[in-house]
Image: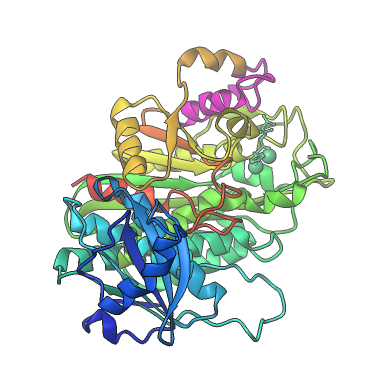
């Protein structure tokens, strides 16, 4: 979809759907043409539309569909409201099979028009997203070709934000596509192919470490989890290195393409959802993709994605087995379903060799995190207050909620093993927290944060910019975190 700022007058617009954003009771609206104001007369008189926050009304003006979207109280319009209102336009365009959509913005009292541009760009792209999957092609489906944004007056900061927001959101849609793909399509090999494509597009480099090298270099966590599988594992290493940089950040994503639980097999009900267990890896790939296009200044970024499925078989890892992670720490495998932390252990060991200032891992790690926070917030763990606060700030600015959970060393006791340096599963309680206690051991001296996206990687409450399925969560947060380092 091509997104641009419109240069013609609003009353000359000929798009198949025109969306008009209206603050509450802003009926005089001198920025609107008389015709469009007229289209609101009856609905307003009949009290069918008052411009309440995200209230929608589909009307017709001349030969054009017009979607009025309320913004609520003029003084309280925030970025999330604009993101959702802009998404309402492309979502409706998809529903009425319009290929061209326009969006008219009122004058806004927001202090930062770049932020407004970002939110609108994100909303337009995310609202138009749809996963068609492997269904027969729908002949009636119309592809959204273009979106034009009408502004009360020209604004170069808004235009720059619009571009920036759409690039981040396109990457988020890429993460959604990967997440929604079934486990027999989104295999480790497919992850490697997508990473290669990102490398080939420029801006970032990509290395794929395959089975022989994984064995030679003793990636014991990844090899252990892969032992029961017929799909070969991969370890992806991507890098963005600008000419000069002050900070190095390492992103790590769990790329578990299907989690059956292994020998500690999961119950069948809902097991199909475990195709989403690679959402952390998808977010890291997508973030690297966006970085290759945006080329942020002053920060070097690594993206590490260990990828495999977790399957039972005669060669699979068994409860009681002891494996040695890439960093040399031995692990007693109590439960083969606690596999995400095993592949992350290798990645954190590798991260230490890269000497980053900050390391952030993203993983659909524990059902316990979903119990704790539901499907609205990501669990955030970090022993570094600085890193925690930076991530909280970025997640607030992008409206991808995250909330801190405990990181104290006391929890290490639950992970004590009698035969290895650590065991991979604690008791029944506090599962999200003991999972972090495990990861912490492998992060060593790294300034490290862990984002448990088990509740937010898919199945979040729907809204204008989210149709269900994989969310592509945290692409926006990570990009913002990196930009805020400057
Ligand atoms: N991928 C799952 C976590 C998960 C479960 C995410 C449900 C989203 C929804 C992970 O590999 C897992 O199985 N974790 C176990 C850990 C336990 C065995 C210590 C869990 O949460 O039950
Ligand atoms: Mn598991
Ligand atoms: Zn898993």
Q: Is residue 291 magenta?
A: no
Q: Is residue 126 left or right of residue 116?
A: right
Query: Is 434 drawn above or below residue 112 in the view shown?
Result: above
Q: Residue at 48% x, 43% y: name it.
A: 362
Residue situated in front as seen by the camera: 229 or 49: 49
Q: Position of residue 103 (x, y in %)?
A: 34, 71
Q: Is residue 170 in sight in this rendering?
A: no
Query: Is 143 drawn above or below residue 295 in the view shown?
Result: below
- Please identify the quadrant where the N terminus is shown: bottom left
Residue placed furthest toward the front: 45
Q: Is residue 248 in sight in this rendering?
A: yes
Q: Is residue 255 left or right of residue 34?
A: right
Q: Is residue 440 magenta?
A: yes
Q: Residue at 71% x, 37% y: name it.
A: 337
Residue situated in front as seen by the camera: 344 or 61: 61
Q: Position of residue 48 (x, y in %)?
A: 47, 59
- How many numbered marks are there? 0
Q: Residue at 29% x, 59% y: name it.
A: 118
Q: Quadrant of ligand 3?
A: top right
Residue situated in front as seen by the camera: 64 or 310: 64
Q: Position of residue 147 (x, y in %)?
A: 37, 77
Can you tell which quarter of the image residue 160 is in?
bottom left
Can you tell which quarter of the image residue 9 is in?
bottom left
Residue situated in front as seen by the camera: 386 or 123: 123
Query: Is 173 drawn above or below residue 95 in the view shown?
Result: above
Q: Tell me where the magenta segment starts and ends, as one range.
A: 415-443
Q: Position of residue 472 (x, y in %)?
A: 50, 55
Q: How is the image coloured?
A: rainbow
Query: Is 422 drawn above or below residue 336 in the view shown?
Result: above
């Amino acid at each position: 979809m091509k997104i641009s700022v419109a240069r013609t007058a609003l009353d000359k617009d000929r798009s198949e759907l025109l969306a008009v954003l209206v603050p509450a009771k802003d009926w005089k609206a001198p920025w609107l043409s008389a015709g469009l104001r007229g289209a609101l007369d009856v609905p307003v008189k009949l009290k069918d539309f008052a411009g309440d926050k995200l209230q929608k009304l589909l009307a017709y003006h001349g030969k054009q569909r017009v979607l009025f979207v309320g913004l609520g109280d003029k003084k309280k319009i925030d970025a999330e409201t604009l993101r959702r209102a802009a998404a309402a336009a492309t979502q409706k365009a998809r529903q009425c099979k319009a290929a061209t959509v326009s969006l008219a913005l009122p004058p806004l009292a927001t202090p930062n028009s770049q932020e407004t541009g970002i939110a609108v760009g994100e909303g337009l792209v995310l609202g138009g997203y749809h996963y068609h999957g492997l269904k027969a092609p729908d002949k009636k489906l119309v592809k959204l070709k273009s979106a034009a944004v009408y502004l009360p007056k020209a604004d170069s900061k808004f235009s720059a934000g619009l571009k920036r927001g759409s690039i981040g959101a396109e990457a988020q849609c890429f993460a959604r596509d990967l997440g929604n793909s079934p486990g027999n399509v989104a295999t480790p090999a497919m992850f490697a192919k997508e990473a290669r494509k990102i490398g080939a597009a420029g801006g970032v480099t990509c290395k794929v470490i395959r089975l022989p090298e994984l064995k030679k270099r003793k990636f014991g966590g990844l090899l252990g989890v892969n032992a029961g599988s017929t799909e070969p594992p991969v370890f992806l290493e991507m890098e963005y290195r600008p000419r000069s940089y002050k900070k190095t950040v390492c992103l790590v994503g769990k790329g578990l393409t299907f989690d059956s639980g292994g020998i500690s097999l999961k119950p069948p009900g809902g097991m199909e959802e475990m195709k989403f267990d690679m959402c952390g890896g998808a977010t890291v790939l997508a973030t690297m993709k966006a970085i290759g296009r945006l080329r942020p200044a002053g920060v070097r970024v690594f993206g590490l994605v260990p990828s495999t499925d977790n399957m039972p078989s005669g060669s699979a890892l068994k409860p009681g087995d002891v494996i040695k992670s890439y960093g040399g720490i031995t692990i007693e495998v109590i439960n083969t379903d606690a596999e995400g932390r095993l592949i992350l252990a290798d990645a954190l060991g590798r991260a230490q060799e890269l000497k980053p200032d900050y390391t952030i891992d993203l993983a659909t790690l524990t059902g316990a995190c979903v119990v704790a926070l539901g499907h609205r917030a990501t669990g955030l763990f970090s022993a570094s207050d600085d890193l925690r606060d930076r991530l909280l700030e970025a997640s607030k600015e992008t409206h991808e909620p995250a909330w801190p959970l405990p990181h104290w060393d006391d929890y290490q006791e639950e992970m004590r093993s009698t035969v290895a340096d650590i065991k991979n599963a604690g008791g029944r309680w506090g599962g999200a927290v003991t999972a972090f206690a495990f990861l912490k051991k492998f992060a060593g001296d790294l300034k490290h944060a862990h984002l448990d996206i088990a509740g937010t990687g898919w199945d979040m409450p729907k809204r204008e910019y989210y149709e269900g399925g994989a969310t592509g969560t945290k692409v926006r947060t990570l990009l913002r975190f990196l930009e805020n380092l400057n």
